[in-house]
Amino acid sequence: MNKKNSLLLIEDNLAIAKQISSFLEGIGWQIDFASVGELGLKLAIENTYDVILLDLNLPDIDGIALCSSIKSSTLHVMPILMVTARDTFEDKARGFSNGADDYITKPFDLRELALRCEALTRRSTLHTERKLTKGHLCVDLRSNASFWQGNSIVLTGIGFKILHKLLEAYPYPVSRSELVSSLWGEDPPESNALKSHIYSLRKALASVSDTACVERVSNVGYILKGIE
């Protein structure tokens, strides 16, 4: 591998986690680790990984539910490889229907695990859209940069995520609850945080455009306007 692929390992068995981490780090992977689902979700929301390795039997949250939460709460495409002792067809079907991209059952050969992770990384790279452009507005998901008619828009990390979410939904609004969930998962900050970030995003858009703006839709959420 020419670069260090990144992997988030969510596994409560420390011995297994150490074994997996040592092997993958030995062949060039960069590993972040969470022993509970809550921390795993937080890391997945705050960072971007080439693969997420998720054990289904976690002490604080069902792995299937966590898989679904990660897929719905993160902006970047991050393939999830489920690791479990559950090997029935019904278990696998439930996992895939909740967002799993691949499935490996215990016990497994670490070499096979590495091959599956590398395959998921290649597949994700091929299918991930690097740029989202609508009207005069563009967001680049690889560099976390945004542009208005080619001119850079200076945004915070949260501002970029909000803009991407709104642009992805355009010309439709995004509910306040969906924005909060995508930004902070199940641990949102105090109630005025989103309003403050929306205000900063409006100022950033106003600095590069006379028309682009974020409008509040009463009892719904927020919507992008004036980007065509």
Image (cartoon, rainbow, N blue to C red):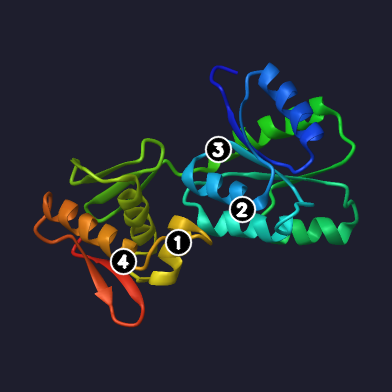
Quadrant where the N terminus is found in the figure: top right
What is the spatial separation of the Cα atoms under label 3 and label 2, in whole angstroms?
17 Å
**In front of the other: 131 or 106:** 106
The residue singled out by tag 3 in the image is 49
Residue name at image x 75 percent, y 57 percent: 95
Query: Picture coordinates of residue 85 (x, y %)?
Result: 88, 47
Q: Earlier along the polypeptide chain: callout 3 or callout 1?
A: 3
Residue 15 location, quadrant:
top right
Query: Which label sits on residue 188?
Result: 1
- Secondary structure beneath disc 4? loop
- Secondary structure beneath disc 2? helix
- Secondary structure beneath disc 3? loop
Residue 213 location, quadrant:
bottom left
What is the spatial separation of the Cα atoms under label 3 and label 1, in whole angstroms?
22 Å
Q: Earlier along the polypeptide chain: callout 2 or callout 4?
A: 2
The residue singled out by tag 2 in the image is 38
What is the spatial separation of the Cα atoms under label 1 and label 4, in whole angstroms?
10 Å
